[in-house]
Image (spheres, rainbow, N blue to C red):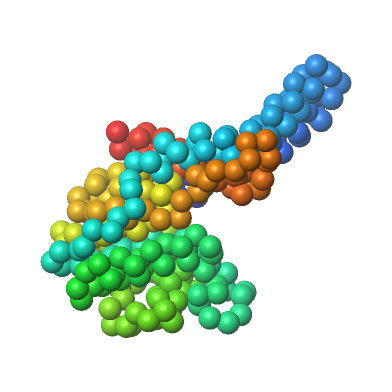
Amino acid sequence: MFWLKKILSLFVMPLPLVLLLILLAFILIRSRAKARFLLACAAALLLVLSMPWGSKLLTAPLEAQYEVNRSPIEGSCQVMVLGSGHDDGIGGSAVQQLSPTALARLTEGLSQLRLGKDCVLIVSGWNGGRGRAHADVMADAAVELGVAPDRILRLPEARDTLEEAEYLSQALGDLPVRLVTSATHMPRAMAIFKLRGIKATPAPTDFYGRSGYWWRPDGSFLLASQLAIHEYVGLFWFWLRHA
């Protein structure tokens, strides 16, 4: 089910979908009207999703649901940072190996640690079938940034948010957590954690809904659109399985 979800979601991502439309246009090249229509759809899709207003239409409904959280953490303090990839091939420190999203999440997680007392940092993520587990790289990066190793809990077998919630529930029981993840991902993460009975308080970071010149397409806006579409697909899949 995990890999089926990954494969199916790939075909609704902007670039694969645009390439598919172009491929279909070439297959139907003898029917010029159909081919021109498919090419026009591919160009329009790529253009709209690369515009600041196009990406903002997709990201805003997700990122507006939860505000930046600077509230003190009272009592038991557990800060959960959801994983988001790294590259073992990059030399140097663990911090350098983290993806931009993972680094943004970890940085916010460290900020959340300072809002409580005797906090435990929880990091997660498997190895993707190769290399080191993402949870281990996140933990090493946190140590490099000043977190004591004995204050870090690792969940190295979790492959996605559903499994992160499951492993966290097994590790902490009913203890509350301050949940850190990207703002676009936060609505789905909160729904999953609620489903698992985890008392999570959101602390979103890594906001992608940015302003720009309305007439100028940019790859960063295309990336933001892709992340938002990924979350809408994830929310739809979650609704199908758990509505």
In the picture, which quadrant includes the C terminus? Answer: top left
Residue 104 shown left or right of residue 20 in the figure: left
Please tell me which residue lies in front, 13 or 60.
60
State the count of labels: 0
Task: Say whether residue 10 is visible.
Answer: no
**Image position, residue 190 (x, y; %):** 30, 47
**Image position, residue 119 (x, y; %):** 23, 72
Residue 8 shown left or right of residue 236 in the figure: right
Residue at 55% x, 39% y is 55
Please tell me which residue lies in front, 223 or 114.
114
**Image position, residue 60 (x, y; %):** 45, 38
**Image position, residue 125 (x, y; %):** 42, 64
Task: Say whether residue 39 is visible.
Answer: yes
Q: Is 158 above or below relative to 140?
A: above
Residue 18 shown left or right of residue 84 in the figure: right
Residue at 45% x, 42% y is 231
Residue at 41% x, 55% y is 205
Q: Is 7 above or below relative to 41?
A: below
- In the current view of this chain or complex, which residue is farthest to the left? 75
Residue at 37% x, 34% y is 240
